[in-house]
Image (cartoon, grey):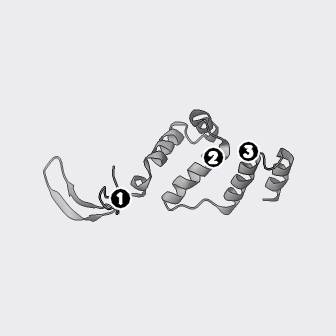
Amino acid sequence: MITKCPVCHGALEIRELGCNKCDVTIRGKFPFSGIFQLSPEQMEFVKIFLKSRGNIKEVEKEVGISYPTVRGKLNDVLKSLGMEPDKKSMKREEVLESLSKGDITAEEAVEKLKKL
């Protein structure tokens, strides 16, 4: 579903609903639900996440990305839906991302995670 105007890139809104059975038409301004505001990439990620029943390790294997990257994509989806992840979760992700990049050792990561 498109949510942005192809001409000016402004937000589109639903202005008319129609019944397929009795042909009643309702006009007004109806907002898109949050799920339709996700980008195509985010929607694909959500499909994979749901298919794996929320198992991040399975998502990691299917998409071929690291655990912290999966968590980051999940946080992006949450933010797009107006749901902010908790601060503790964000700090864990930063530690895991640093570990995956090789910026810190496993021992340093363990110590940092214990302090959270």
Q: Which mark is residue 18?
A: none
Q: Quadrant of residue 33?
A: bottom left
Give 62 or 105, whichever is nearer the viewer: 105
Residue 77 location in percent, x, y? 52, 53
The relative height of residue 112 versus residue 52 in the rendered view (above or below) is below
Judge left or right: residue 27 versus residue 92.
left
CA distance for labels 3 and 1:
37 Å
Q: Position of residue 53 (x, y in %)?
A: 55, 39
Q: SS class of the residue under badge 3?
A: helix
Which residue is labeled 2 in the image? 69
- How crowded is the residue under tag 1: few (<14 C-alpha within 10 Å), some, or many (20+)? some
Instruction: Give residue 32's mark.
Output: 1
Residue at the (14%, 55%) spot, across then down: 24
In terms of secondary structure, where does tag 2 sit?
helix
Please, which residue is most extreme toward the left here?
A: 23
Label 3 CA crowd tier, 10 Å (few <14, some 14–19, many 20+):
some
The residue to which callout 3 is attached is: 100
- Which residue shows up at 51% across the image and 43% down it? 45
